[in-house]
Image (cartoon, rainbow, N blue to C red):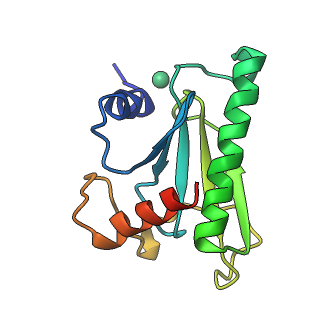
Amino acid sequence: MYKDVICERVALCKKNEFPLMIHEFKNSFFVLGDHQFYKGYSLLYLKKHIRELHEMPKSEYLELSDELYQASLAIEKTLNPWKVNVMCIGNQTPHIHWHIVPRYEEDKNHKELPMYDVTRGEVDLKDHSTQYEEVKQLIENIKSNL
Ligand SMILES: [Zn+2]
């Protein structure tokens, strides 16, 4: 049976065992993305397993919106991108999560939707290794801007 990777990650975050964790909010975990093709690409995982935003109690949805606001602002302050894209899609993993994708003018496709093209040489952090000094530093920098 297919297990939702986000459920697994939320479980790791709850045990404080997810190395790419940036910050724990009341309703969500703010984590750095596995891929850093867009430097600062990060996600906000809702703690509860809920499929659609409109299935959340409205008060929790509004709190989550505030957490997204803080996370997006921290990415802006840390990386000074041209634009911050935020997306809540979840077709592959129907557990509410937001993608926070800083976009840079140097990217010739910066006016297009963000694409996760694995051929473009991004850092793959799928092994959740924290050996990358650059990644640890980036997480610290984002934390300092929350
Ligand atoms: Zn889930």
Please provide percent x and percent y for residue 50. Answer: 59, 19
Task: Please identify the quadrant where the N terminus is shown.
Answer: top left
- Above or below: residue 57 compared with residue 24: above
- Above or below: residue 67 compared with residue 1: below
Residue shown at 60% from the left, 48% from the top:
99
| Residue ranking furthest to the bottom | 106
Q: In this view of the protein, which residue sits in the foreground, 88 or 117?
A: 88
Give residue 17's quadrant in the image.
top left
Q: Is residue 118 left or right of residue 11?
A: right
**Number of disc labels:** 0
Q: In this view of the protein, which residue sits in the foreground, 112 or 14?
A: 14
Residue shown at 71% from the left, 62% from the top:
84
Give residue 80's quadrant in the image.
bottom right
Residue shown at 70% from the left, 29% from the top:
63
Residue shown at 49% from the left, 69% from the top:
37
Please provide percent x and percent y for residue 121. Answer: 41, 75
Q: Is residue 120 left or right of residue 44?
A: left
Please provide percent x and percent y for residue 134. Answer: 35, 73
